[in-house]
Amino acid sequence: MNSPDYTILNWIAVLVEHRLFSIKTPAARRAKRYLLDHFYVNVNAYDLITGYRADDSYFDYAESFLNNGITVEQLARAMQLGKLGEQIVIKSKFAFSKLKYEGFDAVRKDQYYVLRKARNDEANQRYLEILEEESDGLYIQDIMRGGIQNNDPRIPGNVSE
């Protein structure tokens, strides 16, 4: 999902297909359907998928977008907050068979939890700042009403580190 061939909406479409979302309105249900119809990437044939993480922080951003609370540009910016990283999903027995256990490093909770919490707190603060900014970008309703497709240059690509 990190390929230049995919956009942030491809990632969201895969996410809404494979995770439960709080769909609060008929408009959000239509948004989910639109994303699946126009941006979904069938990941069943892949051995491994690399893309944005789907943890609670990113999931909240995606849910806000689906509920027409933030623009696609704000979503793209939010996905980069806090360097929350990317996720690798092993999908096949073949890919799993290629993994090799090389050991582990024990870390001190009192040292690394503080760093993790500070990173997340900073990302949350920056997200709130993004929400306060004036935005005339594309909301999911605009995308649906405009019939915007996957190749539209206004849709930000995936920029994962």
Image (spheres, grey):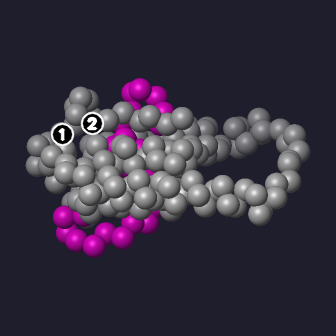
Left or right of 33, for residue 116 = right
Residue, disc 1:
148
Q: Residues within 10 Å of mark 2 (few under 14, many from 20)?
A: some
Q: Position of residue 113 (x, y in %)?
A: 70, 61
Q: Amino acid at mark 2?
A: Ile
- In space, the residues marked 2 and 1 are separated at their CA atoms by 9 Å
Left or right of 43, for residue 5 = left
Q: Kindly check if marks 2 and 1 are in contact, taking CB atoms under 8 A apart as contact.
A: yes
Could you say which disc has been placed on residue 155 in the image? 2
Magenta includes 133? no
The stretch in magenta equals 1-28
At numbered mark 2, what does the secondary structure look like: helix, strand or loop? Answer: loop
Q: Is residue 94 visible?
A: yes
Question: Image quadrant for the C terminus?
Answer: top right
Q: Is residue 16 visible?
A: no
Q: Residue at x 61, y 43 (%)?
A: 88
Q: Nearer the viewer, mark 2 or mark 1?
A: 2
N-terminal-most mark, 2 or 1:
1
Q: Residues within 10 Å of mark 1 (few under 14, many from 20)?
A: some
Q: Position of residue 36 (x, y in %)?
A: 32, 50
Left or right of 91, for residue 75 = left
In this view, the residue in front, 152 or 40, is 152
Q: Residue at x 56, y 39 (%)?
A: 50
Total marks shown come to 2
Q: Position of residue 114 (x, y in %)?
A: 67, 60
